Amino acid sequence: MPMGHTATEKAGSGGLTATEHRLANGLRVILSEDHLTPVAAVCLWYDVGSRHEVQGRTGLAHLFEHLMFQGSANVKGNGHFELVQGAGGSLNGTTSFERTNYYETMPAHQLELALWLEADRMGSLLVALDDESMENQRDVVKNERRQRYDNVPYGTSFEKLTAMAYPEGHPYHHTPIGSMADLDAASLEDARNFFRTYYAPNNAVLAVVGDIDPERTLAWIERYFGSIPGHDGKQPPRDGALPDIIGEELREELREEVPARALMSAYRLPEDGTRAADAADLALTVLGGGESSRLYNRLVRRDRLAVGAGFGLLRLAGAPSMGWLDVKASSGVEIPAIERAVDEELARFAEEGPTPEEMERAQAQLEREWLDQLATVGGRADQLCRYAVLFGDPQLALTAVQRLLEVGPEEVREVAAARLRPDNRASLVYEPAGPGHEPGDGADVTEGTDGTDEKEAAQ
C-alpha cells in the first residue's frame, strides 16, 4: 500500500490541509478533504510542456494532450468524454510551457470512475495510438492554430513577443501551439516515444480534492495506478536562465488587417516562486490590472489615447516571467503618443512606487483571485499539482495568499524600477491594413483585448 504523511495546518492556509503520498512506481499523490459539497476533483499534472521539445518538433506536447482523449486499451474513441459527462462530470486538459494537465470534476460517488479513466490512458494509451488517431488530432490542432492564432486579429502577437523576449535556441522561444511545419513533421513514432518518456507515473502528480474518503481513495489509486511501470529515460529541460534585462529595446512593426492600432510589449520579470515575482504581480496590477489601474486611467479615461489598456503577468518557473502590456489605440491616435504616456507612467511609478490605497487595492484584487481558485475543488487540485511539479512542495499552494500580503510597497517599487524599463522590453506595433486604412489613418473600435486568451492558450 502507498505510504504517506499528513500535513499540519500552516499559518495562512485558511484551514485547508493536504496529505502527501507516493506509490512505489514514483507517482506522487496529494489528497485534500472538503465535505462542503458532494463533488470531487481529479487533477493529473505531467512534468512536460513545450520547454521540453526540441527544434523541429514543436507543438508535440500540445498535440499529445489531444491524443490522450482519443482512446486507450479499454476506452474507445471519444469514450473518455462520454463516460465522464454521462456520469454528471466535466473534464478537459491544457498544455503550457512547463506542464500538461488533465482534470475531471465529478459527483463524489463517481470518483472511482475518473481515477480508473486516468489510469487506463496512462498505462495503456499506446495500445490505441495509431495512424488514424494521429492524423485526426493533427488536423484538430492545426485547425485550433488557425482559429486562435493565424486567422484572428492580433492572433500571433503572443507567439511573436515570446520569440523576441526569449532568444533563438531558448527552451521558451516557441509557444505550446507549435508551428504548422513541425505539426506536419511529427510522426507516429515521435508520439510513441514522447509518451514512453513523459507519460510515466514517476513524472506525474495526482491531486484528488473534495468530498472523499482518503483511505478508500488511496486504495483505488493503488489499485489502478500501482501496476503502471515508471520510466527513467526523461532528460531535464534545457536551462532557461537569462539575464534580468534584455539589454535593448526590441521592436517590430506590423501592417495587418486589425481593427485598430495597437502597442503590445513583453518585459522580462522575476521567475515564479520568488518574492520578487509576487512584487512584480502587484506592480502590474497597480499599473494595468483593470479599470482602476494607472495606465487605464491615464490612457483611456484621462487622455483618451486608447480604448483598452492592460498589464498582466505570465508566471514562469523555469525562465524569467513575462509582463504583458496590451494597449489598443483610439481612432486617429498615433502609437508614439501612447508610448510616451506609458513611459511617463512607468517612470513615475519607478520613482514613487504605489500609494497605500493602490497597494491595498492590488493586494485585495490578487487575494480575491487566489481565493477564488482555492474555493473550488478543481482550482485547489490544480494549484496543489502546480506547486508540487514546479516547486516540489504542494503545501505552498495553501500559503500563497499570505506571501502576497507580506510584500511591501518598496519591494513593488524596486522591481518596477529594475525591470519595467525601455531596455527590457520587446514591442509589437500594429498598423491597420486593408480597404479603408491608409498609412496614418486610425480605426474606430469599441473595446480592446488584453492578451488573456493568447496567454491562457499557452498556459
Image: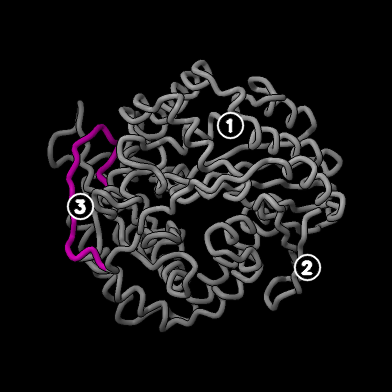
- Which residue is identified by label 1? 68
From this view, report whether residue 376 is shown above or below residue 414. above
For the residues bearing labels 2 and 3, Cβ distance under 8 angstroms: no
Q: What count of labels does the image hold?
A: 3
Residue found farthest to the left = 439
Highlighted range, magenta:
245-262
Q: Residue 404 placed where, x, y %? A: 54, 73
Q: Residue 120 placed where, x, y %? A: 70, 33
- Which residue is identified by label 3? 335
Answer whether residue 328 is magenta in the image.
no
- 384 and 432: which is toward the camera: 384
Q: Does residue 414 appear in this view?
A: yes
Left or right of 81? Residue 156 is: left
For the residues bearing labels 3 and 1, Cβ distance under 8 angstroms: no
Q: Does residue 452 appear in this view?
A: no
Could you tell me the amino acid type at mark 2? Answer: Thr
Could you tell me the amino acid type at mark 1? Answer: Met
Residue at the image position 18 percent from the left and 33 percent from the top: 437
Q: Nearer the viewer's eye, disc 3 or disc 1?
A: 1
SS label for mark 2? strand
Residue at the image position 34 percent from the left and 82 percent from the top: 352
Question: How many angstroms separate mark 3 from mark 1 (CA)?
Answer: 44 Å
SS label for mark 1? loop
- 286 and 272: which is toward the camera: 272
Could you tell me the amino acid type at mark 3? Answer: Ile
The numbered disc on residue 288 is none
- Which residue is identified by label 2? 6
N-term mark: 3 or 1: 1
